[in-house]
Amino acid sequence: MRILIVGAGPAGLALAAALRAHGMTAVVVERAEQNRAAGYAIGVHVNGWNAAERLGLLDAFRARAVSLGTAEYRSPEGRRLFSYNYHALARAVNGKMFSIMRDAVQDVLLEAVGDRTDLRYGTTVTALANREDGVDVVLSTGSTESFDIVVGADGWRSAIRQMCFGPHETFLRPLGFRAAAWRMPLATPLDSSFVGMMDVDHQGGLYEVGDGTAATLFCWRDSSTGRVAPEARQKTLMERFGQWSHPVSLALSTPVDWQRGFFDTIAQIEVPRWSSGRVVLLGDAAWCLTFLSGQGTSTALAGAWILASELAAKPHAQAFEAYESRLKPMVTRMQATSRRIGGHFVPESKLGLRIQSWTLPLLLSRPFAGFLARRMSAEELELDVP
């Protein structure tokens, strides 16, 4: 079986690794000219943990994990609002939880598949014909190739989805936020492993990565969905957060390489069916849980393993149907959870901000952390073919 994976992010690379574990190989094409190192710290939870175990990569991921302890939240002026300990949440899910930078996930996956996979950077699909017995693909290099299956793992703005399923806007569900993230040098350690600052309609923060750098994550309410040019991004952030105190002021005073940073609309993708003929979607191209769910990478890893397992056991049509039926109910529930979380992550009013400052420390304390973790976490999936 000849399989094309479009997109060399975590979903696409995980699928390449999962296919290889099941005795299959794939061609992977990626629009970027090199490995995409942009992004923020991501949480790996039970389904991602279990998928990483099956891929034989759990130890490698955990070795690159970010060490998080106390998270402290402050007002824009620097007044302490509340704090909690990350380890309380990890204990609540039996330790199957860690944070890792997105570029570290990429590095581990590339080490696993890079030398044994036909991985083509600076290449994408410009046209395809979905036939009954295969897919003819025109690549940006000018060549035409035929594949048995094409997997669109090319992100929430997926070109494959647009070619085969319909216009991008048809499946887009904006959540009303934008976010930005980048890495910066950190000469002096932070007071806590994570320092966040919150105000009405805004949140920004920094966390230590452990290599002399800090990672940032900013989120604010914004209903627009168009791209913001790289040269306008710093100005946008200054307009939103420019009056905030340390450490946000430190982050905004540091030059940003937006080729390695993240700046985009926060939106979910809702596709009635994840497959069309011999083309199937994976990861953000199919669902996009957003970082608000905390489950995006874990679900991508789990989805990659499930899809590979089904393809190894069944004809493509049955495999696609089983993959979607096993994964989609959980994805739909987590999308609903993510939408609810957004209103808490970025408070809508001064009253909401005060309520969070009172309730979150209680909910994140040892007696209640298990309840909160269960409410926020995805249920554990059966990853292997029943």
Image (cartoon, grey):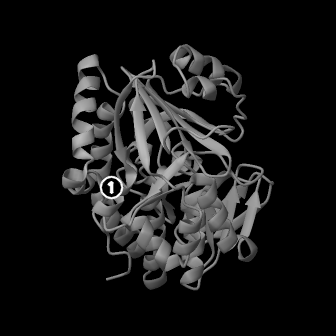
Quadrant the N terminus occupies: bottom right
Identify the residue at horizontal 62%, vertical 52% (top origin): 210
Q: Quadrant of residue 117?
A: bottom right
**Image coords of residue 266 (percent x, y):** 46, 35
Q: Is residue 322 left or right of residue 178?
A: left
Identify the residue at horizontal 50%, vertical 34% (top origin): 205
Give 266 or 80, whichever is nearer the viewer: 80
Q: Quadrant of residue 325?
A: bottom left
Give 68 or 50, whichever is nearer the viewer: 68
Give 320 or 262, whichever is nearer the viewer: 262
Identify the residue at horizontal 68%, vertical 66% (top origin): 110
Q: Is residue 334 left or right of residue 141?
A: left
Give 374 or 115, whichever is nearer the viewer: 374
**Image coords of residue 27 (percent x, y):** 68, 69
Quadrant the C terminus occupies: bottom left
Identify the residue at horizontal 34%, vertical 51% (top origin): 272
**Image coords of residue 324 (percent x, y):** 36, 64
Quick check: 219 above or below 138? above
Secondary element type, mark 1: helix
Say whether residue 172 is visible: no
Callout 1 environment at 10 Å: few (<14), some (14 to 19), or many (20+)? Answer: many
Disc 1 designates what residue?
89
Quick check: 232 above or below 215? above
**What amino acid type should be assigned to the residue bearing mark 1?**
Leu
Numbered circles on residues, count: 1
Quick check: 140 above or below 26? above
